[in-house]
Image (cartoon, rainbow, N blue to C red):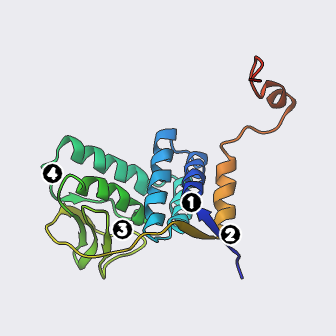
């Protein structure tokens, strides 16, 4: 049986930021990933579990939902009249799109994701999420559009429960952002002048 660790949302945000950077995202996108993880965890969604999936896909060269979500939010900010947009197929852990869809919805209209077989998810102006029967862990012929529908979704959480194995995976990726120990790294660590106050 795997141990479960309770992380403060700020701890989760920091860990996902470092893991995303360790997986090769720029610092800006890594910070967006950390913010998105906190947003998801605050709503009781499995942010850490989903992150391990898209981070593993990123290591194999796949586009991440953080990259897609950030681009979508930027596009809608510059062209708010945009309506129906096709999302990339095969996007791993598309739940990481939801925080960015909330940014879009905050302009005044809820955002919906649908597929040819039905409703996938709805993000309200307040950031509530309702999942439809077509929700999957990979996108498949999904389209995003503005909607007038409103539904209740998840509540709010103050902490995130993460399995020990997921935490170990994220910690390992986060360590890729550190400098390996060497005589030079120890000698060059710290301030070049006295930092005593």
For marks 2 and 3, give the CA distance.
25 Å
Seen in the picture, residue 197 relative to 167 is either above or below; the reply is above
Looking at the image, which is closer to me, 52 or 139? 52
Nearer mark to the viewer, of 4 and 3:
4
Residue picked out by circle 4: 82
For mark 2, give the secondary structure.
Answer: helix
> Dots 4 and 2: beta carbons under 8 Å?
no
Residue occupying the far front of the picture: 197
Specify the quadrant that holds the N terminus. bottom right
Residue picked out by circle 3: 139
The mark nearer the N terminus, 4 or 2, is: 4
Residue occupying the far top of the picture: 193
Label annotation for residue 56: 1
Nearer mark to the viewer, of 2 and 1:
2
Who's the residue at 46% across and 70% down the image? 45
Q: Which percent across, then down, holds residue 187?
A: 84, 25
Neighbor class of circle 1 (other Cα within 10 Å; few <14, some 14-19, many 20+) is some
């Amino acid at each position: 049986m795997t141990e479960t660790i309770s992380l403060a949302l700020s701890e989760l945000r920091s860990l996902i930021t470092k893991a995303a950077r360790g997986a090769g995202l720029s610092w800006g996108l890594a910070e967006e990933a950390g913010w998105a993880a906190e947003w998801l965890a605050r709503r009781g969604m499995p942010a850490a579990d989903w992150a391990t999936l898209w981070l593993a896909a990123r290591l194999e060269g796949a586009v991440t939902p953080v990259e897609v979500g950030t681009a979508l939010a930027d596009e809608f900010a510059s062209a708010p009249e945009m309506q129906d947009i096709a999302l990339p197929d095969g996007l791993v852990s598309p739940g990481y799109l939801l925080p960015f869809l909330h940014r879009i919805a905050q302009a005044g209209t809820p955002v919906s994701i649908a597929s040819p077989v039905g409703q996938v998810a709805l993000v309200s102006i307040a950031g509530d999420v309702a999942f439809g029967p077509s929700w999957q862990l990979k996108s498949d012929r999904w389209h995003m559009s503005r909607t007038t529908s409103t539904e209740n979704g998840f509540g709010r959480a103050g902490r995130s429960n993460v399995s020990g194995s997921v935490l170990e995976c994220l910690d390992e990726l986060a360590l890729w952002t550190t400098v390996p120990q060497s005589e030079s790294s120890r000698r060059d660590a710290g301030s070049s002048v006295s930092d005593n106050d």
